[in-house]
Amino acid sequence: SLVGSEMCIRDRSVGTPSASPQHGLDPSAQPGGANNMHLTHRKGFEGLKEYGGGAQWQDWRFTTVDWLRQERPEFENLLKTIERLKEEPEEPAAGEALMKLDGEQLTEDQQWCLSELYHLLSRKTKDGPKMIVRNLESLAVSRGARAWYRIVREAEGQIEARAAELTEKLHDAKRKPVLAKDLAMTIEQFESELREFEAITGRPPDEHAKALALKRMLP
């Protein structure tokens, strides 16, 4: 009947949300908002380990930066820029919402990344690194960049020691040939050490020393 048809139409309209008014939507429902969901709310965050300083830096940095890069590709260049700085980043003047890194003004997206970085560090650090993060709480704009800068510097002692160790192994004149059955595994380990050296020093290993080391390990 006509009355029944009108009731069905009315029921369908009640059950289907209107497309035009958008009241009370959470950020992830806004255009582009899914990308701006807080990192601490994202899948995989809880699985990240805490960093407490010392020798675990390289493994922790690798895992954490890899996860950040998956969430937002901008993180990789931002963190590398911070790590190359000779001086600690500065808090901008009162009222300014965007800071500068290496003389360049950040975009809103980059500033968002560094804000999220601070919240990540506040939850995924402990002991000495945690104190570094807590001490920067009042610097609302620059605290993410400054926390990363200070944590990296705190870890540099271990980094320098590891670089010296790898350099010594690379130039070891007492390196002996290995058995043919162990050669592939030994070369794989050697190449892993070369990649680590480049990652922590920012420069490739000496080509002559590398060739000499490979020659020495051949059966």
Image (cartoon, helix red, strand yellow):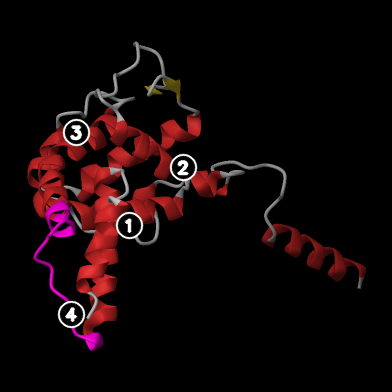
Residue placed furthest toward the right:
2
Where is residue 44 drawn, in percent x and y? 35, 61
Q: Is residue 158 left or right of residue 91?
A: left
| CA–CA distance in space, label 1 to label 2 | 18 Å
Q: Position of residue 92 (x, y in %)?
A: 34, 16
List x then y, in percent, for residue 76: 40, 45
Q: Residue at x 24, y 55 (%)?
A: 209
First reached walking from the N terminus: tag 3 or tag 1: 1
> Helix or strand or loop: what does disc 1 sit on?
loop
Observer-nearest residue: 140 or 84?
Answer: 84
Q: Which residue is mark 4?
A: 178
The CA span between labels 4 and 3 is: 42 Å
Between disc 4 and disc 1, the foreground one is 4
- Residue furthest to the bottom in view is 181
**Badge 2 is on which residue?**
74
Q: What is the number of the mark on residue 45?
A: 1
Q: Which residue is mark 3?
A: 150
Q: Nearer the viewer, residue 2 or 54?
A: 54
The amino acid sitting under disc 1 is Phe
Amino acid identity at mark 3: Arg
| 4 or 1: tag closer to the N-terminus | 1
Q: Which residues are magenta?
A: 166-181
- Residue 88 falls inside the magenta stretch: no
Give the residue drawn at x 28%, y 54%: 208
Viewer can see residue 25: no
**Residue density around tag 1, few if under 14, some if 14–19, many if 20 or more, within 10 Å:** some
Q: CA distance from mark 3 to mark 2?
A: 20 Å
Q: Is residue 5 left or right of residue 67?
A: right
